Image: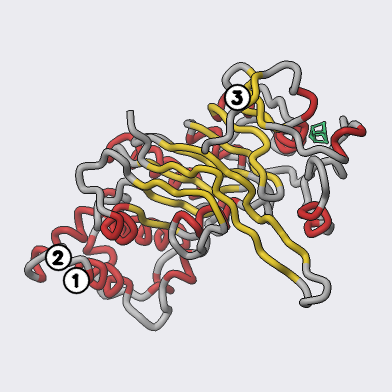
Amino acid sequence: MQPILETRNLTKVFHRGSLLARDRIVAVDNVTFSMQRGEVFTLAGESGCGKTTTARMILGFEQPTSGEIIYGKGEERWHPRVWFSQRIQAVFQNPFETFNPLRKVEGYLFETVNHYKLASSKAEAEELINSKLEAVGLSYGEVAGRYPSEFSGGQLQRISIARSLLVDPSVLIADEPVSMVDASIRMSIVNLFRRLRDELDMGILYITHDLATAYYLGGQIAIMFRGNTMEMGPVQEVLTNPRHPYTQLLRESIPEADPEKKWRGRISIAETEQEEYLREGCKFAGRCPQVMEICKKQVPELVDVDGVQVKCHLYVDRGSVHEEVS
Ligand code: SF4
């Protein structure tokens, strides 16, 4: 089966500081993954790991420094422009920022219908909008004439998802979509993603720091740290049997694979983020409980260990080297 979305050695470099003392920050370093239709692929890691920069490159908001992004190969309706504008849609973290408080919510939905010429009359547009709102558990009658302040965060996020669905996307990029909504309705949004995956056969790129919801959504996961993929494979395998010391540490931060519970928060955002990005060798060496001398000098290779790719010197003799895509 052809992947619906693929990245090959995707890399983004930023430069920080003055001309005389410039730091080269590799925010995304040779990230390679592929995603199928009807599959959730999760990019997970703490803040500043490179997951959102990866998503921004896929969405065309950032230009990659090097590497490739391949969209919808084998798709009947494939065309570069159509893919960028229609086949790939995004839902962002804060639903309150998505909507102008002074503008009625339905205006956004009609705007999308008009922009993509999805209906030839107001009645047809209303019918289409209603069908997409129903797909997320709402209806046009509940939304019509109302302002953003009249909805909860969860409802606004659903409306945002319905808006994305208007163009029948093949891929939905969901960037921390539940982190700003109440815990009580978080699971209903996560369940909605499961339903969209199954019923609409959509690929969902789920970006999160929340391993519990990632586990619940299933599919594949890439654990990222300072721009690098540290571990990648089937989500159940990676999270129940983590091989990489960083995944192990992250895994200890959630009580069980219970999506109702929050992280205990043992992982804090490193104050030394920049230092870690600039570190030679393994980026995790400064915090790794199993650090060795070689880790401080040499970047580990990504190796395949029983179907899971792991980037750690502990596994170099136990796995086969994962070939970089050329
Ligand atoms: Fe720890 Fe070394 Fe593995 Fe990095 S390469 S995660 S420092 S053991």
Determine which residue is flagged by label 1: 114
> Do we see residue 133 in this rendering?
no
Camera-nearest residue between 117 and 137: 117
User: CB of mark 1 within 8 Å of CB of mark 2?
Assistant: yes
Between 310 and 41, the residue placed more toward the observer is 310
Real-space Cα separation, disc 3 to disc 2, in angstroms: 46 Å
Q: Residue at x 68, y 37 (%)?
A: 230
- Badge number at residue 308: 3
Q: Residue at x 14, y 65 (%)?
A: 125
Q: Along the polypeptide, which appears first: circle 1 or circle 3? A: 1
Q: Which mark is residue 125?
A: 2
User: Would residue 105 be found to the left or right of residue 35 on screen?
Assistant: left
Report the Cα–Cα distance between label 1 and label 3: 45 Å
Q: Nearer the viewer, mark 1 or mark 2?
A: 1
* Placement of 242 over or under 34, stated as above or below: above
How packed is label 1: few (under 14 Cα within 10 Å), some, or many (20 or more)?
Answer: some
Displayed-image quarter of ligand 1: top right
Percent position of residue 265, x then y: 75, 46
| Residue type beneath disc 3 | Val
